Amino acid sequence: MGTENPGRPSFPARPSATPFAAAPPAVTPFLSSGPVAGPGVSSFRPPPAAPPNTLPSVSFAPPAGSDGSGFRPTPPARFNDPSVSSPPTTHVPPTGGPFQRLPTPSFPSMAQAPPARAPPVSPQPGQYFPGQVSHSPVSFRPQPPPVPMGSPPQRASYAPPGVNFSQPSSDSSFSAPRPNSQPSFTPVDSTYPSARATLQPPIPGYATMPPNAVSQMPTTASLFPSHQGSYVPGPPGPPPAASPFPAHQGGFVSSSTPGLHAQHSAPPVGVMQNLAEDFSYLSMGSIPGSIEPGLDLKALPRPLDGDVEPNSLAEIFPLNCHSRYLRLSTSAIPNSSSLASRWHLPLGAVVCPLAEPPEGEEVPIVNFASTGIIRCRRCRTYVNPYVTFTDAGRKWRCNICSLLNDVPGDYFAQLDATGRRIDIDQRPELTQGSVEFVAPTEYMVRPPMPPLYFFLIDVSISAIRSGMIEVVAQTIKSCLDELPGFPRTQIGFITFDSTIHFYNMKSSLTQPQMVVVSDLDDIFVPLPDDLLVNLSESRSVVETFLDCLPTMFQDNVNVESAFGPALKAAFMVMSRLGGKLLIFQNTLPSLGIGRLKLRGDDLRVYGTDKEHVLRIPEDPFYKQMAADLTKFQIGVNVYAFSEKYTDIASIGTLAKYTGGQVYYYPSFQATNHGEKLRHELLRDLTRETAWEAVMRIRCGKGIRFTSYHGNFMLRSTDLLALPAVDCDKAYAMQLSLEETLLTTQTVYFQVALLYTASCGERRIRVHTLAAPVVADLSEMYRQADTGAIVSLFSRLAIEKTLSHKLEDARNSVQLRIVKALKEYRNLYAVQHRLGGRMIYPESLKYLPLYGLALCKSTPIRGGYADAHVDERCAAGYTMMALPVKKLLKLLYPSLIRVDEYLLKRSGQVDELKNIMKRLPLAAESLDYRGLYICDDGFRFIIWFGRMLSPDIAMNLLGPDFAAELSKVTLSEQDNEMSRKLVKVVKKLRENDPSYYQNCYLVRQGEQPREGYLLLANLVEDQIGGTNGYVDWLTQIHRQVQQNA
């Protein structure tokens, strides 16, 4: 990849009469097609070069990070300019590989000896010391102005005859020694780029020195201070330690520690600083004689630490709400529409209003009582930490619309000398970004509803045989004491097959009464007042019903499903109060209104323009029902069980538009999946729920949210109707600029969720966030949040599959990544010689991998043979509602090795965290002698290597160790090894309680089971004709370079 002449280097020719021998070959993943410019690129024009015979020992050295880029040292007279500062004279090679992060580190490299510092120097006013660079924790500075490019300066370094100095080059991975008597210096890290000191470039692909070999450079006298990015010889013995500057990857060195000053003169830093490579990159090349990319797989960026919550804004705006409640796709808001159009990635936010607070924190509850909630009278913003008080505390200015509001008398407080209220420490709403207000009666259109749970259960023959009904009945009974809202909680049941069964559970009865309605065309509700009962009053009747339910239909042989009429009946019962409707569906609806056809097996439509029709509701009945349910504050959760097609696309619509979610259990059998259903139903029933909620997000003047993505019903242009919300639901939205140019320096966002708590209080949860406005595209990239971007990407891609082919959805993801990286590359193409490097901001280093993982995810991967249409749709509904952290884990699962931990003695193991080190999702991470767990947050795949010790397998599986693993269930055996594995599995489940991870055992080579369970999760490998990670990066890089 690179220029048109891959076999010919493009650096300028050196004098032919060089006294130095050619460098031997070095193993390189570098691009052989051209130079790769490093951070030392300068704008100085060189004087004429001296004749070769004038300075027999002069070495014309390229700068660090370049491959003969034409850079020449400058004469010493140029350094006497007092207006510029100088870089250090020594440099320690970086410890990074082909993947390098180039901004200045805060600490010296560990490969460097402790620096010998000069005595402290007190700076004079206005004095600037060479190399003294200050850094704020987070920089929102504009991009440095471009510096006109000229021919690089020349410089000579004097040395004894026969001595050659090694120079770093960014497009090679190993340092090569010099021939014979020429001493060399090899960096400690063997992946550091090798030297180029002669006209002939080394041939990549062949190692000439063992990694980590270290030799010392000889003592020498240099008439000229070394240029940034080049090596300076140190005295014999220990490595040079005279530089007070930390080593910097890529060759650019500066000090980020106050008080560290250069002790010598050197080339100007002022101009160099403007050209510092503030980006990360991969050197894209190929191995000679092969079409394989020469990338070091170990050096590729991987999110092995999972989702890292952004904290850059927290340092600048410490009063912001926590990022788990509200995350922006970039924390730097563009100041103009033209700048926003160059962003190319989704510009928006991900909101999880009821996310579990960080450990040790609570969202404070504020009750204004008689004062009433303090809000802006124009834009209705709630009082928050960013409002300002004026006029001795009698007025406050809205931070969103700038209107001056009166302070109510009951809320008045004096201001101190700094303009802060004297009671601010007693006002959580003025000191915390997240707060909950108790809403007065004017925020209610009716009395707060009680928590209400209604169960609609399929009792056809397939549901009976699978054991689903028994598990559901037992689980509901076990958690009756834990249902929120006691003693106000309401409960009711309907069962159905070809008829509909209502249950009278009046508290005066000793056992429930069943009423059967067989007229499906004219549904009516018998005993309308006794079908929904207060749980605390009718507890004994409810328990009797749940005990009898599994046996009540055990002889049922009915294969039909009147789901549509049963749904209407449930709606009629619930419409007076609202609540949560839990649907347990096992059979394709076949009778009455809402009946569906078997359309998922039609192979002819795949790959055509009609393919998307399979992923949208067939019958408009379901979307209309969802609208009616939302209107009456009824949220729906769908539990789907079947080994056959049940049209999740249609039934799942009920959950999508009512703020619910879809739980999918294909081929459900109680013996294998009962525990998963039990755990997830228990969490659904007992987690804290916000009832009859609406949510709105407000933002500053000049910007607005234009589209919303997730499971909800949009009641107006910006009001989301959410009949039931909980901590496992997130919503994404995109914003746009209404005005051509923003004049403010800060933009504010405020999320407000008005809901009824289970205790009966009406509350408003408010999250407020401030973000800076920037005029610099590079700052937008620098402050990007990969997690929020991927969340928006995934929702947009899934929505695209509802109107386009799967291939179109995958292409749209790749195209936006390419456009973004191309725009970012153009920012640096003038100032830096990028050559064959793929550059990207550090904040987005994982974006290409997550993009690949998204394209391989269940909702949009492959075609007909790659995923069942029900499985696709269920995964799509699930991903549309997932918070950022859970979504990223689903896209890039955890892979950990556990056999080594199991073999250790208990006394030798400190903590379970020792084995929680995640591995890259590639086949080469798997050792055929090992035992691994792959965890995507929804299931565990436990992989047994082909040569795993039989003792381990026997201890873990007991007598079934040699059986086919698809028929084996992991259970605790009576030995230490088994107990330790169960402990690991339990720990992993505790870390992510939203879903229950069932264990699937698979042995290496056990096809096709290994393929669809584990290998499909190895997103970095080429599987089923899809790209691997390296191919994906190569493909993206080629498209970025086109017309870049």
Image (cartoon, rainbow, N blue to C red):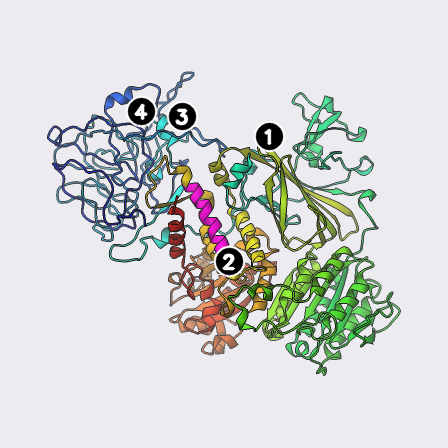
Task: Verify CB contact (< 8 Å) between mark 4 and mark 2.
Answer: no
Residue picked out by circle 3: 259
Let me know if residue 676 appears in the view: no
Query: Which dot marks residue 263?
Result: 4
> Mostly what secondary structure, the magenta segment?
helix
Give the amino acid at mark 4: Gln
- Label 1 – label 3 distance at C-alpha: 36 Å
Give the amino acid at mark 2: Asp
Secondary structure beneath dot 4 equals loop
721, 452: nearer the viewer:
721
Residue picked out by circle 1: 744
Which quadrant of the figure has residue 259? Answer: top left
Residue picked out by circle 2: 808
In front: mark 1 or mark 3? 1
Secondary structure beneath dot 2 equals helix
The magenta-colored residue range is: 807-825
Secondary structure beneath dot 1 equals loop
Of labels 1 and 3, earlier in sequence is 3
Q: Residues within 10 Å of mark 1 (few under 14, many from 20)?
A: few
134, 300: nearer the viewer:
300
- Label 2 – label 3 distance at C-alpha: 56 Å
Of labels 4 and 1, earlier in sequence is 4
- Label 4 – label 2 distance at C-alpha: 59 Å
- Label 2 – label 1 distance at C-alpha: 39 Å
